[in-house]
Image: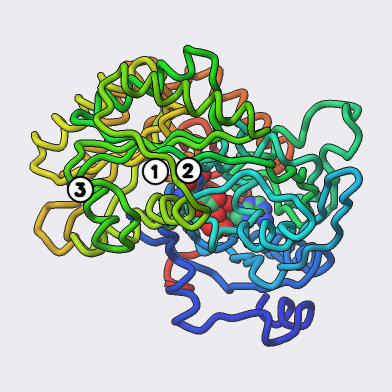
């Protein structure tokens, strides 16, 4: 099989040395790595198609992979599949400024796209905190969000069409550039499908005009609950900021030590709010947010006076996860969503859960979306700590669901939330999801063992068993 892959792609585009296999056995999650089969680096759609056909002929499964920054274990290879890396498919193929659309290859780094568009007066709106490294293909597969998705919507709202290589090697274009493409919205089914319906090889993304005016406010509080309540009150007042992010004191101090973003160290929480648009509207919104903040207990409100100050405030937020490396070598970043009005209540429960398991927890989250990101920091070398981390995680998920929330806001289900799927969906819901998947991939060869619990997915079990143990291990 490797000879066939090398003949199709060129020898240097197929690797099976021990270091490469080990590297591709993991993503950025805390979950145990899988076992990677050969890793392929196709350069275009035809090469992806060739890999998929070879895999099908040998009865092997496939895992697409972008930058491996996923936090739910989505790119972890189970059953020694062929890993298809998009690391050499990094071209921005076409930018149509008139119709505000760009066609890109899946390996394009999110921030590189925005940098490319900036001189034209545009940007790509979904801005995950990992945007310096994650890929548009990974964003599509996980329907990723980011701080500025509150006003603009997550990835799904910015993807018009996707060229996909299906598991039999055929090519389909899902969606289209027209306002209302004909037929079922299969593009919508593919966005968020976590690599299980096919491999995205070209993606048409919507461009967003850069706003004429921006104001960034930093509000400080003596209680995390006050910051959370401000978020609900702002939205209830009919103001929809571009972004609303909360950070508690522990993470604020870590960020200050790391980049010196200008956050107050003595506040129990800070709320970062950004409003965009025409300057007159921005000024009105900023004044209203300041008033709502003060009415909800803000002890200080500051508006960034310069572009540099604004950039620094955002740098602090976007490097928050790197900052915690000063405190402990490992972290588990959770991702659940609760109704905005329940934010303060669920946050309190999360702090109590961490205390009960004797764990250090910090909260930094996309508050406007009700998207919680409890961050547990720990040293994986401590005996039994990972068991406590996972047990606390299960309780956080249960508390979020009990509050009327959902399993994931943006990181996806992968292997992380798979065990909780039947707490959220009934058997019929899961069967319907499985049927949709098999319509794309009847033998479940695309990223098997993820998302859908195995009791609802017999073909998955077949795909995972297809490779005798020990071949790649
Ligand atoms: C520090 C940090 C901060 C983060 N912040 C955010 C955030 O703010 N918002 C957010 O949403 N996420 C965030 N994430 C999670 C992660 O960055 C996103 O899920 C991102 O979209 C993953 O992209 P990737 O290129 O790394 O994909 P990978 O991790 O390589 O893969 C993710 C999934 O996509 C599939 N996939 C990849 N490429 C393709 C393709 N071409 N076709 C089909 N399937 C494909 C894979 O099989 C896998 O299931 C963060 C992660 C880190 C480490």
Label 3: state its secondary structure: loop
What residue does disc 3 label? 265
Rounded to the nearest angstrom, the CA distance separating label 3 from label 1 is 33 Å
What residue does disc 2 label? 411
**Which percent across, then down, holds residue 150?**
55, 31
Residue visible at 28% across and 22% down in the picture? 344
User: From the viewer's perspective, is residue 214 above or below residue 285?
Assistant: below
Residue visible at 76% across and 67% down in the picture? 91
**Which percent across, then down, holds residue 102?**
81, 52
Q: Is the CB of the residue bearing disc 1 within 8 angstroms of ligand 1?
A: no
Q: Is the CB of the residue bearing disc 2 within 8 angstroms of ligand 1?
A: yes
Residue visible at 84% across and 45% down in the picture? 100
Q: Reading the chain from its start, which is encountered first: label 3 or label 2?
A: 3
In this rendered view, identify the residue nearer to me: 419 or 138.
138
In the visual, does 184 lie left or right of 89?
right
User: From the viewer's perspective, is residue 218 above or below residue 105?
Assistant: above
């Amino acid at each position: 099989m490797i000879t066939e892959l090398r003949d199709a792609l060129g020898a240097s585009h197929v690797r099976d040395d021990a270091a490469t296999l080990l590297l591709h056995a993991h993503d950025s999650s805390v979950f145990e790595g899988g076992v990677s089969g050969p890793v392929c680096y196709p350069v275009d759609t035809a090469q992806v198609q060739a890999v998929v056909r070879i895999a099908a002929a040998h009865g092997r499964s496939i895992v697409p992979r972008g930058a491996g920054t996923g936090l739910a274990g989505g790119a972890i290879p189970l059953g020694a599949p062929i890993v298809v890396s998009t690391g050499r498919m990094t071209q921005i193929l076409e930018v149509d400024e008139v119709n505000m659309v760009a066609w890109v290859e899946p390996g394009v780094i999110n921030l590189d796209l925005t940098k490319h568009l900036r001189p034209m007066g545009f940007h790509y709106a979904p801005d995950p905190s990992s945007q310096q490294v994650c890929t548009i293909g990974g964003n599509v597969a996980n329907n990723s969000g980011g701080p500025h998705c509150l006003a603009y919507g997550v990835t799904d709202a910015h993807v018009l069409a996707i060229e996909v290589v299906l598991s039999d090697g055929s090519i389909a274009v899902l969606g289209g550039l027209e306002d209302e493409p004909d037929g079922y919205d299969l593009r919508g089914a593919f966005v968020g499908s976590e690599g299980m319906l096919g491999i995205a090889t070209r993606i048409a993304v919507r461009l967003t005009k850069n706003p004429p005016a921006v104001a960034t406010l930093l509000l400080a509080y003596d209680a995390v609950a006050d910051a959370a309540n401000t978020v609900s009150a702002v939205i209830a007042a009919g103001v929809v900021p571009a972004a609303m992010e909360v950070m508690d004191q522990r993470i604020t101090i870590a960020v200050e030590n790391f980049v010196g973003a200008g956050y107050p160290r003595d506040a129990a929480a800070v709320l970062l709010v950004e409003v965009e648009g025409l300057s007159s509207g921005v000024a009105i919104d900023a004044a209203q947010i300041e008033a709502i903040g003060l009415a909800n207990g803000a002890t200080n409100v500051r508006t960034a006076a310069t572009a540099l100050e604004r950039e620094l405030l955002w740098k602090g937020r976007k490097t928050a996860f790197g900052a915690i490396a000063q405190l402990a070598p490992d972290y588990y970043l959770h991702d659940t969503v609760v109704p905005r009005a329940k934010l303060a209540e669920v946050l309190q429960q999360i702090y109590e859960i961490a205390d009960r398991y004797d764990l250090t927890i910090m909260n930094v989250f996309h508050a406007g979306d009700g998207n919680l990101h409890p961050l547990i920091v720990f040293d994986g070398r401590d005996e039994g700590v990972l068991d406590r981390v996972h047990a606390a995680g299960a309780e956080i998920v249960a508390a979020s669901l009990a509050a009327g929330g959902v399993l994931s806001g943006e990181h996806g289900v992968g292997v992380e939330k798979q065990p909780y799927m039947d707490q959220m969906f009934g058997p019929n819901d899961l069967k319907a999801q499985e049927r949709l998947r098999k319509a794309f991939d009847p033998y479940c060869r695309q990223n098997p063992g993820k998302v859908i619990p195995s009791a609802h997915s017999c073909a998955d079990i077949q795909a995972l068993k297809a490779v005798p143990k020990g071949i790649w291990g």
